[in-house]
Amino acid sequence: MSGANADDASGGGDASRPSVAVFRPADDRIDAAAAFLESLGANPVTDPMLAVEPTGTVPRDAPFVVLTSKTGVELADEAGWDPGDATLAAIGPATAGAARDAGWTVDVVPDEYTSAGLVAALEARVAGERVEVARSDHGSDVLLDGLREADARPTETVLYRLTRPPEAGDSAELAAAGELDAAAFTSSLTVEHFLDAASERDLRDAAVAGLNTATVGAIGPPTAETAAEHGIDVDVVPDDAEFEALATAVVETATQR
């Protein structure tokens, strides 16, 4: 085990506190996630499953611009991009907050923080309009297909690529050993990268079995579906697709167990 928090979960931490794996990128997001889990009474197992590789591109000009992550907002802002007169849509409060911090006006935030929620929020406004979708290279087809069904003309710009750090996988070893109490998956890609890391260690079946005796949370239905497709039983899907809601529900369920 290379991570200090993974060592804590395997015996160095408070055994009365559930060990919860978290897979955020290795930046301020993993630190904030760990701090939040600690505030809930958990031992965080920080195992970053995502690395951000900027492409150097910015959103194209269009009457409507959709941003689907805080990371995308920050990269576009750092590159000097500004939405100008475009109607700006953000997938959820974190993305919208980052956009407002950049000095931009956010016009649309859907009630449901998913691609389907964005489509529902925009479909009455975008018929015949070009809609620029700026996001990672792992964006869901649901958004583009939904916009086309609403008679919009979507275009897509990849602002960054998401890769798996080569050192990721401590949590898979803990799960395989039965030493992980819970896991909080924040995207379908974190599920896939967890399983890839387990496979590289020849632990995939054991890691899945370990997860299925633990508490597994997924940030939304698409992530839960990906987990289920790979044989992982999901116990928790919060109503709000935000990390804080996911972490709270996971810790509550794991503690009750």
Image (cartoon, helix red, strand yellow):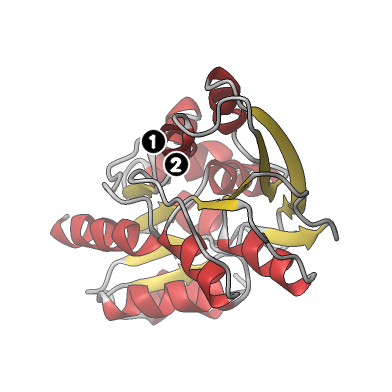
The mark found on residue 205 in the picture is none
Q: Quadrant of the N terminus?
A: bottom right
Q: Quadrant of the C terminus?
A: bottom left
Residue farthest along the right direction in this orientation: 56
Residue 7 showing in the rendered view? no
- Location of residue 18 with respect to 145 vertically, above or below: below
Residue farthest along the front direction in this orientation: 85
**Viewer-proximal residue among 131 and 165:** 131
Q: Residues within 10 Å of mark 2 (few under 14, many from 20)?
A: many
**Viewer-proximal residue among 89 and 43:** 89
Residue 144 showing in the rendered view? yes
Apparent side of residue 73 relative to residue 100 in the rendered image (left or right): right
The answer to the question of whether label 2 and label 1 lie on touching residues, with beta carbons closer than 8 A, is yes
Q: Amino acid at mark 2?
A: Thr
**Could you tell me how many numbered marks the image carries?**
2
Q: Quadrant of residue 243?
A: bottom left
Q: Amino acid at mark 1?
A: Pro
Instruction: Tell which circle, 2 or 1, labels the residue nearer the N-terminal end.
Output: 2
The residue positioned 41% from the left and 61% from the top of the image is: 93
Query: Which residue is disc 1 drawn over?
Result: 221
| Residue 17: x %, y % from top left | 26, 73
| Residue 72: x %, y % from top left | 66, 59
Mark 1 residue element: helix
Give the CA distance from mark 2 to mark 1.
9 Å
Q: Quadrant of residue 120?
A: top left
| Residue 209: x %, y % from top left | 42, 39
Query: Which residue is disc 2 drawn over?
Result: 114
Apparent side of residue 250 relative to residue 12 in the rendered image (left or right): left
- Location of residue 137 with respect to 116 vertically, above or below: below
The residue positioned 85% from the left and 60% from the top of the image is: 56
Q: Residues within 10 Å of mark 1 (few under 14, many from 20)?
A: some
**Viewer-proximal residue among 108 and 190:** 108
